[in-house]
Image (spheres, rainbow, N blue to C red):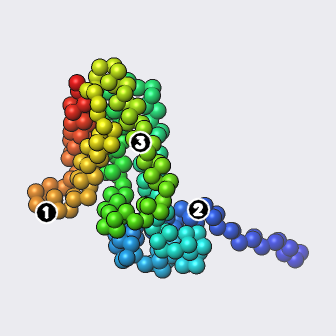
Amino acid sequence: MPDTAVPPRPRLRDPEQTRRDILDAALAGFADKGLSGARVDEIAARTATTKRMIYYYFGSKEGLYAAVLEEMYGGIRDAEQALELESLDPVAAMRRLVEVTFDYHAVHPGFVRMVAVENIHNARHLQQAPSVTQRNDAVIRTLRGLLDRGEHAGVFRARVDAVDLHLLINSFCFYRVSNRHTLQVIFRRDLTAPEHVAAHRVMIVEAVLAWLRP
C-alpha cells in the first residue's frame, strides 16, 4: 500500500519563549560587555534567531537593553511581593525581606552587573522605563508599612526613612557581589564560598534589626 501519511508540520516558535530566550541571552551579553560592548548579532546567535527578530521584539539595541533592566528589577520586586509579609510580625517580616534581598543579589550577579552598567550611563535608560520606577515604589511602600507596624508595636524605633532603610539593606548585598573579584584579590577571600555567603546573610539581617531597635 502506498504511504499516505501526512508529514508533520514544522513547529512554530512560541513568541513568548522566543522573547524570553532573547532576554536571557541579552542579559549575559550586557552583563559581560556592557551596552557598548555587547553585539546584537552575538545575542541573536546565542538564541538561534536573527537580528531582525530582535529588532522586531525590542525596536533597537537600546530597547533590548532597557527591557533587560526592567526584567531584572522586576525579578527582585516579584520575589519581595511573593513573601506575604502581612501575615508575619514586624521583626519576622523584616528579617524575611532582608534575607530575600540578600539571596536575590547573591544568586543573580548579572543583575548587580547590569545596575553597575546603568550607573555608568547615568541611569539614562531607566528614565525611559517608567515601569521600573513604579515597581521600585512598591518596595518602599512595603518597607514603610513594616516600619509603621514595628513602630506601633514598639519593636522598631521611630521616624525611620524607608528609602534610607532600603539603601542600608541593599548596599551590603550589592557591594559584596559587585566587588567580589577585587575583594578576593585584596583579602584572598572567596565571597561565593558557602560559609561566607551564610555568614554574610546572617550579618546583614542582624545589622538591620539592631539598627531598627528602639
Residue at the image position 22 percent from the left and 24 percent from the top? 214
Taking depth in this image into account, of 159 and 120 the one nearest to the observer is 159
Q: SS at mark 2?
A: helix
Counting from the top left corner in percent of width and height, residue 113 is at: 32, 62
In the image: residue 85, left or right of residue 150: right
In the image: residue 204, left or right of residue 29: left
Counting from the top left corner in percent of width and height, residue 80 is at: 43, 41
Q: SS at mark 1?
A: helix
Do residues under tags 3 and 1 come within 8 Å of each other at their CB atoms? Answer: no
* Residue 99 visible in the current orientation: no
Q: Who comes first in sequence, dot 3 or dot 1?
A: 3
Gap in angstroms between the C-alphas marked 1 and 2: 40 Å
The amino acid pointed to by label 3 is: Val
The local crowd at label 1, few if under 14, some if 14 to 19, many if 20 or more residues have their Cα within 10 Å, is: few
Quadrant where the N terminus sits is bottom right
Residue under circle 2? Answer: 17
Residue under circle 1? Answer: 185
The amino acid pointed to by label 1 is: Val
Do residues under tags 3 and 2 come within 8 Å of each other at their CB atoms? Answer: no
Q: Who comes first in sequence, dot 3 or dot 2?
A: 2
Q: SS at mark 3?
A: helix
- Between disc 3 and disc 2, the foreground one is 3
**Snapshot quadrant of residue 114:** bottom left
Residue at the image position 52 percent from the left and 65 percent from the top? 21
Gap in angstroms between the C-alphas marked 3 and 2: 28 Å
Q: Which mark is residue 139?
A: 3
3 in relation to 110, above or below: below
* Residue 150 visible in the current orientation: yes
The amino acid pointed to by label 2 is: Gln
Residue at the image position 38 percent from the left and 25 percent from the top? 149
Q: Who comes first in sequence, dot 1 or dot 2?
A: 2
